[in-house]
Amino acid sequence: MSVRRFNELRGEEVVYAVDRQERTFLPDAEHCPLCPTRPGGPPTEIPVESFEIAVFENRFPTFEAPEGAAEVVVYTDDHAGSFATLEPGRARDLMWVWRQRYEELGARHDVAYVLIFENRGVEVGTTLHHPHGQIYAFPFVPPVALGELAADERLGGCATCELLARELRDGDRVLRGEGEVVAYVPFAARWPYETHVVMREHRPSLLECGDSELDALAEVLQAVTRGFDRLFERPFPYVMVLHQAPCDGRGAGHLHVEFYPPLRSATKLKYPAGCEQGAGTFVMDVLPEDSAAALRSAIDGPS
Amino acid sequence: MRPLTLGYTFIVDEERYGPLSVVRVVKEDGRALILFARA
């Protein structure tokens, strides 16, 4: 069971989940716990010979009932590939899986916020290469979500709607400007190739999205991640996070997906170091307009 | 409940969600597993 302590100087919760020290670390493909259990093979987390999408309670949870939950979302039974290379129908189905988990977990009395995310690449701490993401059902609303609620208040309405409108007016950083889902490098990006994928209409969460919006979200997310991989012609590490309304009745929020890729070139990482960690101020080596131009070419390039 | 392919793993529920079928399973150690597939 994890333990929470409140860090007074930062004004935020810290979670101690010490059992996670023992979690499986970069196993070879033969011993992947996210592959299906095959006859004669070692047991895995998913005791069937094949599957499409599987979700299970994390064996090494950061949160667990009665104070939240931690789940693993396995995108495919194919050990190779990534979110970007999923068959498009599978990516569309994944949007429904995310929606179902947000709805079910968010309805629990011990859950205040549902965080759906993927860490891709050892550069951002991935411990398993099999294509998968995670869900943390928080028993509290975490600081980033609170910051977005504060931004709503500061801007006198939905901050994401306002920022989307500004990006579309400006246009310099827009990667995908047509359709029901828009992608752009934000004006004040904190990572060299930070990218936001935003529902054009105000949708607090996946629950308010129509079928075509969910399809469009899958399509744009795959277009962006394929573009990432083409940018430096290498598997592109990223953290991908869905931002949705808290589940504790506050009701605010605007569904969007934020990517935090750590690469600043094909071989160099951006480290959150002294200024970022000690002062909370990000210093960037590249202007968002320039990274948007490079990303746009990569996304629009040959598939 | 009916057994899945291995040991003491049981299917406890089957339902639909949007275009997906949802099969809920309890694993041998008591943890939940949900299998989603295009219906």
Image (tube, coloured by chain):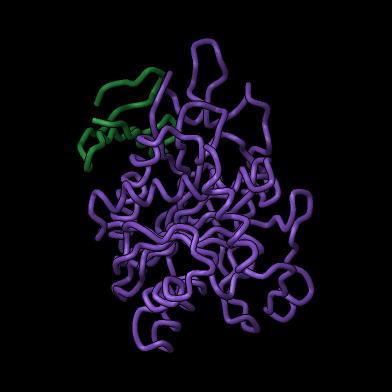
Chain colours: A purple, B green
Is residue A187 toward the left or the right of residue A137 in the image?
right
Q: Is residue A225 above or below residue A253?
A: above
The total of numbered circles placed on residues is 0
Q: Left of A252 or right of it: where is A41? A: right
Q: Based on the displayed image, in which of its 4 quarters is residue A2 positioned? A: bottom right
Residue at image coords 63%, 25%: A29
Relative to A125, does residue B23 appear above or below in the rendering?
above
Residue furthest to the top: A40
Image coordinates of residue A215 in percent, x first then y, are 32, 46
Q: Nearer the viewer, residue A25 or A230?
A: A230
Residue nearest the observer in this picture, A62 or A150: A150
On the image, which quarter does residue A235 sit in? top right
Would residue A60 be visible to someone looking at this image?
Answer: yes
Instruction: Please report the residue visible at 52 percent of the width from the left and 42 percent of the height from the top.
Output: A59
Q: Residue at x 48, y 46 (%)?
A: A223
**Residue in the image at 38% along x and 23% along y:** B8
Q: Position of residue A287 (x, y in %)?
A: 66, 70
* Residue A24 placement: quadrant: top right
Q: Position of residue A50 (x, y in %)?
A: 41, 21
Q: Is residue A67 visible?
A: no
Q: Nearer the viewer, residue A303 or A241?
A: A303
Q: Residue A201, position in %: x, y?
A: 29, 66
